Amino acid sequence: MSQSEQRMRETLQELPSGLLGSGSVPETQQQSLPETQQQSSLGQQAVEAKNAQKTELQGRQTSGKYTLNDFHILRTLGTGSFGRVHLVRSNHNGRFYAMKVLKKRTIVKLKQVEHTNDERRMLSIVSHPFIIRMWGTFQDAEQVFMIMDYIEGGELFSLLRKSQRFPNPVAKFYAAEVCLALEYLHAHEIIYRDLKPENVLLDKNGHVKITDFGFAKYVPDVTFTLCGTPDYIAPEVVSTKPYNKSVDWWSFGILIFEMLAGYTPFYDSNTMKTYENILNAQLQFPPFFHADVQDLLSQLITRDLSKRLGNLQNGSEDVKNHPWFSEVVWEKLLCRNIETPYEPPVHAGQGDTSQYDRYPEEENSYGAEGDDPHHDLFAEF
Ligand SMILES: Nc1ncnc2c1ncn2[C@@H]1O[C@H](COP(=O)(O)OP(=O)(O)OP(=O)(O)O)[C@@H](O)[C@H]1O
């Protein structure tokens, strides 16, 4: 099985402690591959229509700014471990949004209540050109909902798999935008903890938008929680040491490596072996990696926290000042005043979904009323 087949949307909720001693394979949440193939589009449309009709009938006011009644649900854009993300259209202004729906029961079962509340909290305070904007949240008896900007250009992951690997300047452009987003989050004491190309979306002009704040957390000091995505997890997380922002700079290095190579450096089809590689294996560069990127990656993907770039006294400045980024005019980039290397072909306008894979639509229970044993756990929604 190839890496791209296996890794698809594999997000780890929690690693058992004493990981390498135990010999057991950590539990991961694996999603099936996106179904781009011929699905019964008639069946799909019927389910979509039924869901939309139910939504119109059943929205109910909660603590958020919106209700389900404010939106018409269109197709599914993506699925995750606890629910799915739909394209929706506002009944008021006609604009398209992405609605992330998470099932309360699953969140509770997988012990992700705190992460889900953190996701909401973090998204409601961040405001940055390269980070997704959230407009509001609400809940019904069975799920919580988050309304975000709809980003038309699709996942960086899809573009990377189509391209196999990016030329040096293209990888540098995406890395530079991601670097500014990380710099912003860290300046606000937020660790992101799930950097990977699946969570980097491209807007219609080809600029980066980081989505999925499911593991983002306000951490002014250190934390211990074991979470992330196997290939991208930093060694200090694998070995259950206290950690902070350093983990995002490790993942940033893995992201650059994957963009340039088309694969991640510590991959193994056996997740346990991946962790062993993260802890022990030597970083090996393909021969076509430029010397300056090899130098940058050696300083990002280093197990020595006292040497990891981004984690030192000058923080993100050290990363931005590295020779690999020497052509980047950071101020212009932040204003999105630099031509993007690729403009996603989203010719049908704001609601164009051509860049997203098709997922089987399921009948939903959105708007469910009645007993809600979990209401208090999600009081902020
Ligand atoms: N704002 C958005 N606009 C367009 N598509 C989006 C948006 N947010 C998410 N998606 C799509 O939905 C997918 C799943 O979203 P997200 O990663 O937030 O869900 P998740 O349940 O937290 O997933 P995971 O289990 O991987 O952590 C994304 O990879 C992306 O394809």
Image (tube, helix red, strand yellow):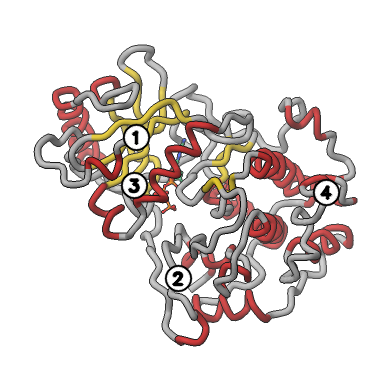
Instruction: For residue 259, say whether it is visible.
Output: no
Residue 243, image quadrant: bottom right
The numbered mark, 1 or 3, whose residue comes first in the sequence reads 3
Q: Image point 43% across, 74% down: which residue? A: 16
The numbered mark, 2 or 1, whose residue comes first in the sequence reads 2
| Label 1 environment density (alpha carbons within 10 Å; few <14, some 14–19, many ≥20) | some
- Labels 2 & 1 near each other (Cβ < 8 A): no
Q: Which mark is residue 15?
A: 2
Kindly give the residue lying farthest to the left in the view shown: 370
Q: Residue 359 carries which label?
A: 3
Residue 333, image quadrant: top right
Ligand 1 quarter of the rendering: top left
Q: Image point 28% across, 48% down: which residue? A: 360
Q: What residue type is labelled 1?
A: Glu
For the residue pair 52 and 349, the one nearer the viewer reads as 52
Q: Which amino acid does label 4 sit on?
A: Asn
Q: Could you give the CA–CA distance between mark 3 and mark 4, rounded to whole angstroms?
A: 44 Å
Q: Image point 77% across, 69% down: which residue? A: 286
Mark nearer the viewer, 2 or 1: 1
Q: Could you give the CA–CA distance between mark 2 and mark 1, rounded to whole angstroms?
A: 28 Å
Q: Is residue 136 left or right of residue 324?
A: left
Residue 63, horizontal then vertical, whole percent: 29, 27
Q: In this view, does 200 lie to the left or right of 280?
A: left
For the residue pair 269 and 45, the one nearer the viewer reads as 269
- Labels 2 & 4 near each other (Cβ < 8 A): no
What is the secondary structure assignment of the residue under circle 1? loop
The numbered mark, 4 or 1, whose residue comes first in the sequence reads 4
Mark nearer the viewer, 2 or 4: 4
What is the secondary structure assignment of the residue under circle 2? loop
Q: Which amino acid does label 2 sit on?
A: Leu
Residue for badge 4: 314
Q: In this view, does 323 lie to the left or right of 211?
A: right
